[in-house]
Each structure stands twice: as structure tokens, then as C-alpha cells.
Amino acid sequence: MQALQGLAWLLVMQSAGEVLSRGLGLPFPGPVVGMLLLLLALRWAAVREPVSACAGFLLSHLSLLFVPVGVGVMTHLGLLGQYGLRMLIVIVLSTWIGLAVTALLLKGKAESGDA
Amino acid sequence: MPKFVELWVYLSATPLFGLTATLVVYVLAQTVYTRLGQAAWANPVLWSVLTLASLLTLTGVDYPTYFSGAQFIHFLLGPAVVALAWPLWQRRFELRQRWRALLVAALAGGAAASTSAMLLGWAVGLPHDVVLSLAPKSVTAPVAMGIAEAVHGVPALAAVFAVITGMVGALSGRALFNLLRVSTTGSGWMARGFAMGTAAHGIGAARALQVNPDAGAYAGLALGVQVLLASLLIPLVVR
């Protein structure tokens, strides 16, 4: 029941986020606004306890949620056949650059001790 | 025999097929991944996608039919993004101390990934709309699609790039961090996790969550921050 209540809270926050995002023409997608709203609401135990039960389950299986979009790669085989190798090289290199820049900046911070 | 064919035609056309196939294949891939000691190359997303795509090709089921069932899983991405507030809340005190350093890292890392992807894409001669679709590649797939639409890229292609980016991060992150001598102590896990969430979004974060809880929480935080920064900045900068 806790987890179900938690899911209800997540959906309520997402819906409120969608309404705010579209109603006010915000640049953020609905679920992101929902995340910010939930962050504010978590100070109340009535929200916190059910959400912790549901969020833990949902986030521990996060990778499953990307499978349907991933399978969609097969619908772009034509484009991938033409540019596939070049696209892959670009994606691999830019991902490494992103990972390295972020990790090195934080690594320096962590070691200088001022966190 | 015709009975069997009829039955198959019925089953493959209902949403039940896409949903069942996705869950069963993923559970199997996850089991193998666990048995192999969570080796990066055994990534469950990668193998589930390859298995399902081969299965669909072999059985002649088209993607829209598959997606009519798989959409129930896909739908949960929205609530999962909302749920990212939970790991943030749990670490709110650390965040209050470290938010400047984390924000700088998120901005620099996200900008580095995005601009390097577009520059490299342009340099190797990819078409213009493909280059634009590369801009939001570090952001979780559903958001990447929205951003791609805003900058006149191809949303479906942006989702594909985001998924491949996530897999590259999940597969090679550990080796790269070891090479860069990022430690595996408290602050090292913060750097590793936050980098995974910044440059490899949800798929990288899922990998980080499995490796270390601290890394996972920072990855979740980074993914949330990246969604905010990218949806605000990419449409402003890329025009």
C-alpha cells in the first residue's frame, strides 16, 4: 500500500509539473518540474514515507525503462548503415570527453579538501 | 499448423507481446549480468536491446506493434524522473555544502560533451539535422527528444543517440575513471557517480547505482541537474 501511495504521489507531482510547464510555457519538461515540486513536498512525512518505498524500487530498475527506446534504434538502420561508424566514433569520443571533464573537476575539488 | 500461425498472429499483434518480451528478456539479461559479477560488457540494457531487436526482426513484428506493449514500461520514465527527487532529498545536507563545485562540474561536463559531439559530428561530415540531434545526447532520452524538437533536430534520432551515449558511459566509465586515477573512496565515488549522471544520464546512473550507492545517488543528482541545464541552455545556445 505504501508503494502504491508513493506511485500516486509521483504521478500527482508529474501531472502538476505538466500543467505548470505547459501552462506557464516553462523551458523544463513536465517530469522535471514534477521532480522539483516533489523535492519541496518531501519535507512532509506523509509524502516522504510512501515515496521512499516507491522511488527506491523504480530507481533500482531504472535501466529497464530505457529498453523500449533502445529497441527503437532498429527503425533507423538505414541512416545508421550510411553514417553508423562516424556517428559511433563521435558519440564515444564526446561521451569520454564529458565523463573526463566532469570527473576531473570534482576529483580536484575532493582532493583539495574544501569539498 | 495453421492454428499455431493464427495464434502467433494474434499474440504478436497484442500489446501483451511487447510488454512480456521486454520484461522477460530484461530479467534474463539482468540475471546473466549478476552471474557475471556485473561486468560492464554484460550491460543488461545493451543485451536486452540487441536480443529484442533480433527477436523482432526474426519474427517480423514491426516496432510500432512492439511499442504498443512496451510503452507501459516506457511510460514509467516520467515518474522515474520525478522520483529522482528522493536521492536528492536524502543527500540535501552534503548538497548544501558542495553545490557550487557540483554545478560547475555539471555545466562544464555537459557543455564539453554537447559541443564536442556537435563539432566532431560537423567535422566528419554528418548532415546538419543529425548534428543538431547530437546536442542533447547527454540528457535522458525522453527529455533529449523534447530538446531536439526545440532545436529542429530529429527527436527519434536524439533518443537513439542518448541511449547509445548512456551505454558507452556504462560500458567504459570504470576503465576511464581508473585511467584518470579517480579514487574509489568517498569523494572518488562522488566524482565517478556525478560524471556518469552528467555525461551518460539514466543508463550511466543505473550502472553507478549498481556499483556503489553513493556513486548512484550522485549520478541521480547529476542526471536531474543535467536535465535542468540542458533544457534551459541548449535551446538558447543552439540556434
Image (cartoon, grey):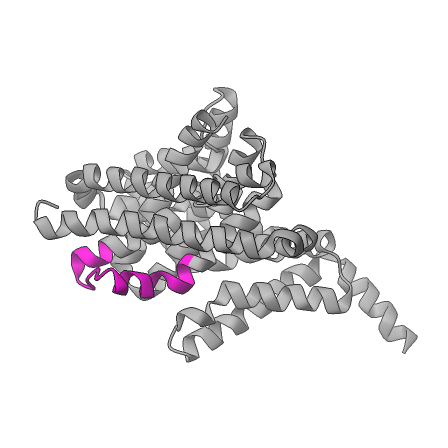
Q: Residue at x 32, y 61 (%)?
A: B176
- Quadrant in which the N terminus of chain B appears: bottom right
Q: Position of residue B164 (x, y in %)?
A: 51, 55
Q: Is residue B196 visible?
A: yes
Between A53 and B114, the residue placed more toward the observer is B114
Q: Residue at x 23, y 51 (%)?
A: A104
Q: Position of residue B223 (x, y in %)?
A: 37, 45
Name the chief secondary structure element in magenta.
helix
Left or right of residue A10, residue B8 in this image: right
Q: Is residue A76 magenta?
A: no
Q: How many marks?
A: 0
Q: Position of residue B169 (x, y in %)?
A: 40, 57
Image position of B121 with respect to A21: above or below: below
Q: Is residue B182 magenta?
A: yes
Left or right of residue B121, residue A9 in this image: left
Between A79 and B198, the residue placed more toward the observer is A79
Query: To which quarter of the image does residue B112 belong?
Result: top left
Q: Is residue B68 visible?
A: no
Image position of B86 with respect to B9: above or below: above
Residues in magenta, as a range: B169-190
